[in-house]
Image (cartoon, rainbow, N blue to C red):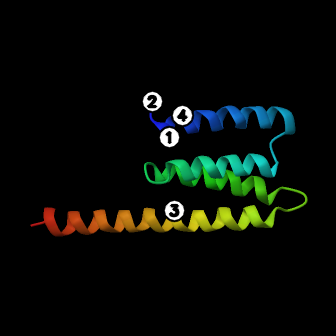
Amino acid sequence: MSEIEKGLEFCREKLRDQKNRLGENQPCIARILKIMGDAIMSNDRNTSLQYYEEALSILENCIPPDYQTTSVCLKWMAGAYRLVHVTRHFADQVSKNFFSS
């Protein structure tokens, strides 16, 4: 098991604990999801985006709002979307230039 997988498993345990103790819409749960997204960003951008989107959904429903965590989450989501777009664009260009004749 890699260090990232160990970290994700630890986060999943903490996520379950926090949800059981505090409920679904808490900033600390969004922070755990953001950490999980950060951990896998370089390996699995789509899953990372799912974690960020779930975190953002929670943050949008928090009272009082947690603006700092929300802004950090949005920043990381923007970066992830940019990387996904660049990767897809690069793959499209490679297949267009090298595999079409």
Q: Quadrant of the C terminus?
A: bottom left
Type of amino acid at the residue the image marks with label 1: Ile
Rendering coords of residue 25 (x, y %): 82, 47
Check contact, mark 2 vs mark 4: CB within 8 A: yes
Residue marked by disc 3: 80
Dot 3, how many residues are within 10 Å of its Cα: few (below 14), some (14-19), or many (20+)?
A: many
Quote the CA–CA distance across marks 3 and 1.
18 Å
Quote the CA–CA distance across marks 2 and 3.
25 Å
Q: Using the image, tell me which numbered label, if any, was put on residue 1.
A: 2
Type of amino acid at the residue the image marks with label 3: Ala
Side of 101 relative to 93 (left or right): left
Residue marked by disc 4: 6
Rendering coords of residue 94 (x, y %): 22, 65
Quote the CA–CA distance across marks 4 and 1.
5 Å
What residue lies at 75% left-to-right and 46% top-to-bottom? 29
What residue lies at 77% left-to-right and 57% top-to-bottom? 59
What residue lies at 68% left-to-right and 31% top-to-bottom? 13
Q: Earlier in the sequence, mark 2 or mark 4?
A: 2
